[in-house]
Amino acid sequence: MKTTKRPLWQRLRDRLNRAVHHRRLLSSIRHLHGPATPQATLNEVTLVTLVRDGAYYLPAFFDHYRSLGILHFVFIDNGSTDATLDMIRAEPGTVILQSHLPWGQFENDLRRYAAVRYCRDRWCLFADMDEIFDFEGRSEIGLDGLTNYLHSRGMTALMAQMLEMFPKAPLNTVAQMPYDQVLTQFHHCDVSTVRALDYTSPDTGFSYFLQGNTLENPNAEILFDGIRGKVFGENCCLSKHPLVFVGEGVEPGVHPHCSSGVRVAGFAALIKHYKFANDALGRDRASIAKASINHGEDRLRAEHMERSPDLSLWSSSAQEFPGIPALQAQEFLMTSDAYKTHLAEASQ
C-alpha cells in the first residue's frame, strides 16, 4: 500500500520534540549510589529495574535474583518515599539512579538509559518488582549457562511469558500479606483464555519495534489476556524480552514488552507475575489519582474490585502452578529441541 510522505514541518517538529524529550530525560537523572560505570564482567548479567516505593518487595526480590546468580543491580528510582533507598544502599552490588519525571511518559527511556549505561556489551535482565523470572534448565546450567548457550547460538534476546499468579482466596483478604508469603501462597494460575498472535502481526500494537528482530523459531507468538483479560477485560500483553545482550545494533527496552534489533531464541522463559500482591485496589486507586498511565487498565481493575469487594480470580479453570514442562505442554511456553538436547547433555 502506498504511503504519503509526511510534510517536512511535521518531521522537523517531531525531531525537535524527541530532542527536547531526551534532554529532559538526561537533565533529570541523578546518580545517588553505587558505581558510576559498569562493574559486571562480560559474562555476568546485570539486573535493571524501575522502582517507586518498593520496600514491600525488596527482601524477597533480592533473595530470588541473588539465587539466580545476579550480582549487579541497577535501580532507577522514580521518587520513593518509603525505606526503598536505604534498603537498596544496604545491599552489595547495587546502583541507584533517580529521576522524578512522570513514569507513564518516561519509563521506557529510563530503563533504556540504565541498560545502555551499565550493560553495554553485556547481558541485561529487565525485571519489575512484582516479577519473578525463571527458566527451563535453571537447576542444570544456571543463569550463566543460559547466557552462554544463547551466545553460542548467536542469540541476543530471550522472550518470556508472564503468568499471573493468584490465591484461591478473595483478593481483599490477602491485600496486606507480606511478599515472601505471597510467593508461596499465590499458587494458582489460569491460561484458559490466553490469546496468541503471530510475532510479526500488526495487531500486537507494537509491531514497529519488532519488525527488525530475527526469530530462531519462526512460529514464535505474542500472548495476550489470560486471567486479567478474563476477569477485568484488560487487553493485557503477556510477552516480554526480559533478557537482552546490549550489543551492536541492539536497542534495549524501547517498549515495556520488547527490545529492537535482537535475535530472539527459539524457546521462552517464564515470569511469574504478582500484580495482585501489596493491596492491588489501593495501588490502582493511587495510580488513577496520579493519572500515572493512560491505557486505563488501573481503572478497569479498580471498578471491578469496588463493585465486587469479595472478588476472587480463582475459578474452575484455574490450576495450581504446574511447572515449566507442563506449561510447555499446554503451549503457553515455547520450547526448543536444540535447547532440550543441550540440557540433557549438560546433566550427564
Image: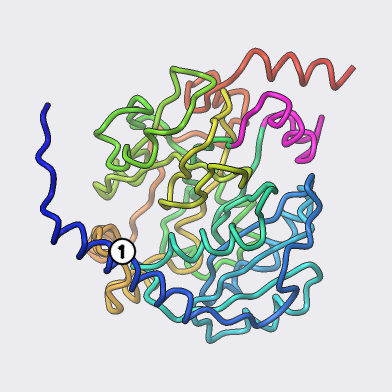
Query: Residue at 54% of width from left, 44% of height from top?
Result: 250
In this view, the residue in front, 165 or 255, is: 255
**161 sits left or right of 97 in the view:** left
In this view, the residue in front, 200 or 42, is: 42
**42 sits left or right of 107 in the view:** right
Q: Quadrant of residue 290?
A: bottom left
Tell me residue 150's x, y (percent): 68, 30
On whether residue 153 falls in the magenta region, the answer is: yes
Q: From the image, which quarter does the C terminus lie in?
A: top right
Colouring chosen for the image of the structure: rainbow
Query: Residue at 33% of width from left, 73% of height from top?
Result: 20
**Segment tinted magenta in the rendering:** 136-156
Residue at the disc numbered 1: 309
Amino acid found under the numbered disc labelled 1: Pro
Q: Is residue 311 above or below residue 20?
A: above
Q: Is residue 162 above or below residue 33?
A: above
Tell me residue 32's x, y (percent): 65, 83
Q: Quadrant of residue 221?
A: top left
Q: Quadrant of residue 239?
A: top left
Q: From the image, which quarter does the N terminus lie in?
A: top left
On whether residue 18 falls in the magenta region, the answer is: no
